[in-house]
Image: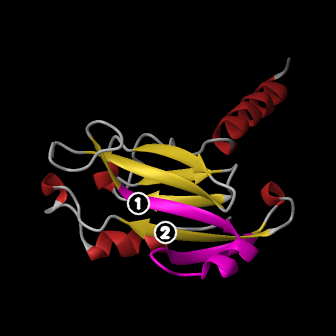
Amino acid sequence: MGKVELIISLFFVLFLAGCGKEPIMDQPAQDGKFYYRNKDLGFNLVLPPEFLYYQTQRKETPDYIDLEFFVPTNDTGYPQEVPSYAKPAVVRIFDKDDWERIGGEGIFQKLGEKKGWFSGGEKKVYSIKFWDEPPVDWLDRWSEKIEQEIIGGFSTR
């Protein structure tokens, strides 16, 4: 193999290595944020640095799909579905017909809509609900600004 072919081969290998690089969801990116991507449900969410060690759980019903986000807490008096974790946010995905039938925005705030391959071509409505009151150890870390940043970090790309 000549020099030209070797250089082209090395360039090609480096190019391919850089193309597939995506942020790792369970580690913060350089800006400290977590770039959550759910291909199956067709959405992305940018989570703040405070979500360090977050976990997710998916629940399905006939009317909607919930994707629950959990963060660590030391507040033993706080109601916990998952031991040592509190639930700051739930993303709920409806078929558009179910969203309209159930009454649209209630306790969930609409984030957006998408017609996608994952839903058999049906239009989906994405919504979010944040906890009513954070645990004691989150009072100084949680704010309306964080909620607005999470909402602003939602996309269906």
Tag shown at residue 89: 1
* Mark closest to the chain's N terminus, 2 or 1: 1
Vertically, is 75 above or below 135? above
- The structure residue drawn at horizontal position 82% and vertical position 68%, both measured from the top left corner, is 122
Residue 45 at x, y percent in the picture: 52, 60
Residue 112 at x, y percent in the picture: 62, 76
Image quarter where the C terminus lies is: bottom right
Tag shown at residue 142: none
Vertically, is 119 above or below 81? below
- What's the magenta region? 88-114
- The structure residue drawn at horizontal position 61% and vertical position 69%, both measured from the top left corner, is 126
Badge 1: residue crowd in 10 Å (few <14, some 14–19, many ≥20): some
Identify the image quadrant of residue 103.
bottom right
Element class at badge 1: strand
Amino acid marked by disc 1: Ala
Badge 2: residue crowd in 10 Å (few <14, some 14–19, many ≥20): many
Whether the magenta-drawn stretch holds residue 45 is answered as no
- The structure residue drawn at horizontal position 70% and vertical position 72%, both measured from the top left corner, is 98
140 relative position to 127: left or right: left
70 relative position to 23: left or right: left
**Nearest the eye: 7 or 17:** 17
Identify the image quadrant of residue 65.
bottom right
- Is residue 23 in view? no
- Is residue 143 in view? yes
Whether the magenta-drawn stretch holds residue 101 is answered as yes
> Residue beneath label 2, please?
128
Give the distance between the C-alpha atoms of the residues marked 2 and 1, in whole angstroms.
7 Å
Element class at badge 2: strand
Vertically, is 116 above or below 32? below
State yes or no: discs 2 and 1 in contact (Cβ < 8 Å). yes
Residue 78 at x, y percent in the picture: 20, 50
